[in-house]
C-alpha cells in the first residue's frame, strides 16, 4: 500500500471508532455522574493526571525508536527491525520498573495530597484503589504493549486504533450496565479497568504476531544492543524535555484545579475538556500515520515534494481547526445544558469558551509543524520546552488563584500559543528547511485573516433567523449539522483563492475520490 493509502485507511478506521466512542462517552459520562457522583468522577480524573506525570519516565524513547525504525521499515530489513523492537522491549521494561517504584513511592503521599477530600469524608481506601488501578493499567502499556510502536511507525496505526477502541467500548458498556442495572459501585468500575487493560494487552500481542509472523523480538536480547543504537538515547534525552512540556500542558490544569478549588470543580472543567480533547484526539489520531509518512518522505530527501506536502498539511489543518473552533464555540454550551442535569455542570462564559476553543485550534494546527520536526529529528530546543512548561504552571496557578477556572484556561492558551505558533515554526525553518521563515508568517497571517472573516460571515448568516432555536435536541442537531458545513464552505472557498496549499490539497482529495469511484 502507498503512503496515502495507509493514511486514508487510518482516517476511515479512526472516523468510525471516533463516532462510536464519542457517542458512548457522552452517554456513559452522564450515567457515571449519576451513579458515582461528581466527587468520585473528579477523583478518577485527578488520579489519572498524577499517573500521567509518572509516564515522564518513558523519556521519549518511543518517539526516538520510531525515528530509528523509519529507515529499516523503508528498506524492509527484518533483522534490524527485530533488533530495534527488542531494544524497545528492554528499555520499556526498565521504564516500567521505574514507574512502578516511583508510583509506590508517591502512594505514600496520597493522604497529604488528598487531605482536603479525606477531611470532607472521602475514604482513603477508595483513593488508593483508584490510584493503584490506574497505575496497574499504565504499567501494562510498558511491560506488554510496547510492540504497538512498531505498528504505528509502519503506518499501521489503524490496527492499534481498532483493538484499543473495541476493548474500550466493551469496558464502558459493561461498566454502565453494572452501575445502572446491577447496583455495582466504584470498586467494580475500577476492577473492570484492570480486566480490560489485560484484554487489550493480550489481544494486541495476538495481532502483532499475525501482522509480523517473522518478528522474534526479545527484551533480553535488546539489552545487548544498547551500544549499537546509541542514537536512540541521544534522541531520547532531547525528546524527554519536550515530553515534560506536553505532559504539563495536558495534566497540570486538572491538578491545579483540584488543589486550589475542588474535585467537583475538576468534574465541571472536564465536561469541557473531554469534549474538546476527544475532537483533538480524533483529528490527530485519524492522521497519525502521517507521522510515519512524513518521516519516510523526509528520508527520501526530495525537497520540492517535502515543501508541497508541508503546505498541503498546513492548509488542511488550518481549515479543519477553524471549522472546529467556530463550531464548538457555538455548540458546546447548549450541548452541555442538554446533555447533563443542572447539578452536574457549570456553564462557562463566552470569553472562557473562546479561550478553550482557541486551545483546541492550536492543538489542531500545530500538527503540521510537529510532523516535520519529528521527521527531521529536531528536538534540540530543550530550553524552549522547559520555558513552556514553567510558563504554563506559573500562569495556571496565578490565574486559578486570581480568577478561578478562567485563569487556568487563559494560562494554557497563552503558553501553548507562544510555543506552538511562534517558536516551533521558526525552529523548523531554521534547522529543518534551512530557509528564512518569512513566507510562513505571511501565509499563516493570511490564513488567520480568512478564518476570522469566515467566522464573522457565518455568524451573520446564521443570525438571519432561518435556523430553529437551539434549546432542544432537534434544534441543536440542526445547528450541529448546518453550522460546520456552512463555515467549512465559506472558509474553504476563501482559502482556495489565497492559498496554493489549499488548492493542492483539494486537488489531491478530488483525484483520490475520482480514482476511488472510477
Image (cartoon, rainbow, N blue to C red):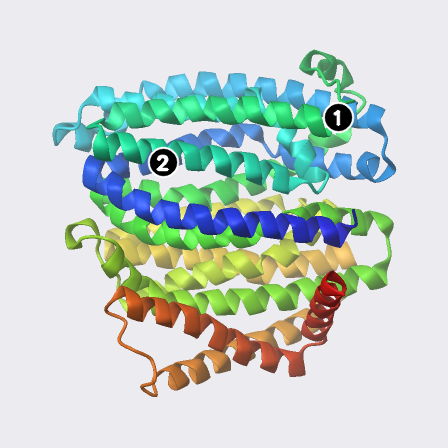
Q: Position of residue 342 (x, y in %)?
A: 16, 55
For label 1, count other residues whose C-alpha is less than 10 Å away and answer few (under 14), some (14-19) or many (20+).
Answer: many
Which residue is disc 1 drawn over?
84
For label 2, count other residues whose C-alpha is less than 10 Å away and answer few (under 14), some (14-19) or many (20+).
Answer: few
Which residue is disc 2 drawn over?
173
Q: Alpha carbon of mark 1 to alpha carbon of mark 2: how far? A: 37 Å
What residue is rendered at 41% in x and 62% in y? 357
What residue is rendered at 58% in x and 76% in y? 492
Residue 512 drawn above or below residue 344: below
Horizontal relation, residue 274 to residue 452: left or right: left
Q: Nearer the viewer, residue 433 or 303?
A: 303
Q: Is residue 397 visible?
A: no
Q: Position of residue 26 (x, y in %)?
A: 34, 49
Q: Secondary structure at mark 1?
A: helix
Residue 377 drawn above or below residue 4: above
Q: Earlier in the sequence, mark 1 or mark 2?
A: 1
Amino acid at each position: 500500500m502507498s503512503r496515502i493509502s495507509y493514511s486514508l485507511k487510518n482516517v476511515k478506521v479512526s472516523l468510525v471508532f471516533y463516532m462510536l466512542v464519542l457517542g458512548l462517552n457522552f452517554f456513559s459520562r452522564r450515567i457515571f455522574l449519576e451513579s458515582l457522583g461528581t466527587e468520585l468522577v473528579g477523583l478518577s480524573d485527578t488520579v489519572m493526571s498524577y499517573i500521567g506525570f509518572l509516564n515522564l519516565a518513558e523519556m521519549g524513547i518511543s518517539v526516538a525508536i520510531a525515528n530509528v525504525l523509519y529507515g529499516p521499515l523503508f528498506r524492509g530489513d527484518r533483522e534490524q527491525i527485530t533488533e530495534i523492537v527488542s531494544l524497545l522491549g528492554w528499555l520499556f521494561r526498565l521504564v516500567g520498573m521505574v514507574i512502578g517504584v516511583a508510583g509506590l513511592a508517591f502512594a505514600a503521599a496520597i493522604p497529604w495530597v488528598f487531605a482536603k477530600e479525606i477531611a470532607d469524608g472521602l475514604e482513603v481506601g477508595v483513593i488508593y484503589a483508584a490510584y493503584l488501578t490506574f497505575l496497574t493499567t499504565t504499567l501494562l502499556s510498558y511491560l506488554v504493549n510496547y510492540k504497538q510502536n512498531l505498528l504505528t511507525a509502519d503506518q499501521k496505526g489503524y490496527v492499534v486504533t481498532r483493538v484499543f477502541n473495541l476493548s474500550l467500548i466493551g469496558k464502558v458498556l459493561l461498566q454502565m450496565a453494572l452501575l445502572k442495572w446491577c447496583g455495582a459501585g466504584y470498586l467494580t468500575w475500577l476492577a473492570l479497568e484492570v480486566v480490560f487493560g489485560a484484554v487489550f494487552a493480550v489481544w494486541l500481542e495476538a495481532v502483532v504476531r499475525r501482522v509480523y509472523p517473522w518478528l522474534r523480538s526479545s527484551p533480553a536480547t535488546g539489552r545487548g544492543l544498547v551500544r549499537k543504537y546509541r542514537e536512540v538515547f541521544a534522541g531520547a534525552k532531547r525528546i524527554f524535555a519536550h515530553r515534560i512540556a506536553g505532559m504539563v500542558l495536558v495534566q497540570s490544569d486538572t491538578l491545579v484545579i483540584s488543589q486550589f478549588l475542588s474535585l467537583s470543580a475538576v468534574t465541571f472543567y472536564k465536561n469541557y475538556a473531554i469534549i474538546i480533547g476527544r475532537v483533538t484526539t480524533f483529528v490527530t489520531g485519524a492522521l497519525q500515520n502521517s507521522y510515519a509518512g512524513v518521516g519516510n518522505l523526509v528520508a527520501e530527501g526530495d525537497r520540492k515534494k517535502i515543501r508541497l506536502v508541508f503546505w498541503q498539511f498546513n492548509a488542511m489543518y488550518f481549515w479543519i481547526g477553524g471549522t472546529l473552533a467556530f463550531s464548538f464555540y457555538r455548540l458546546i454550551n447548549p450541548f452541555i445544558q442538554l446533555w447533563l442535569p443542572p447539578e452536574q455542570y457549570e456553564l462557562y462564559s463566552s470569553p472562557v469558551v473562546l479561550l478553550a476553543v482557541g486551545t483546541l485550534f492550536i492543538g489542531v494546527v500545530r500538527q503540521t509543524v510537529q510532523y516535520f520536526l519529528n521527521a527531521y529529528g529536531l528536538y534540540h530546543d530543550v530550553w524552549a520546552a522547559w520555558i513552556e512548561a514553567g510558563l504554563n504552571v506559573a500562569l495556571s496557578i496565578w490565574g486559578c488563584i486570581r480568577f478561578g477556572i478562567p485563569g487556568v484556561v487563559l494560562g494554557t492558551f497563552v503558553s501553548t500559543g507562544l510555543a506552538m505558533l511562534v517558536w516551533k515554526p521558526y525552529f523548523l525553518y531554521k534547522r529543518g528547511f534551512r530557509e528564512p521563515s518569512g513566507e510562513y508568517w505571511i501565509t499563516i497571517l493570511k490564513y488567520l485573516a480568512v478564518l476570522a472573516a469566515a467566522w464573522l460571515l457565518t455568524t451573520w448568516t446564521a443570525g438571519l433567523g432561518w435556523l430553529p432555536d437551539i434549546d432542544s435536541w432537534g434544534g441543536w442537531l440542526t445547528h450541529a449539522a448546518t453550522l460546520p458545513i456552512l463555515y467549512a464552505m465559506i472558509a474553504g472557498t476563501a482559502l482556495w483563492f489565497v492559498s496554493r496549499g489549499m488548492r493542492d490539497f483539494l486537488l489531491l482529495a478530488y483525484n483520490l475520490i475520482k480514482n476511488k469511484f472510477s
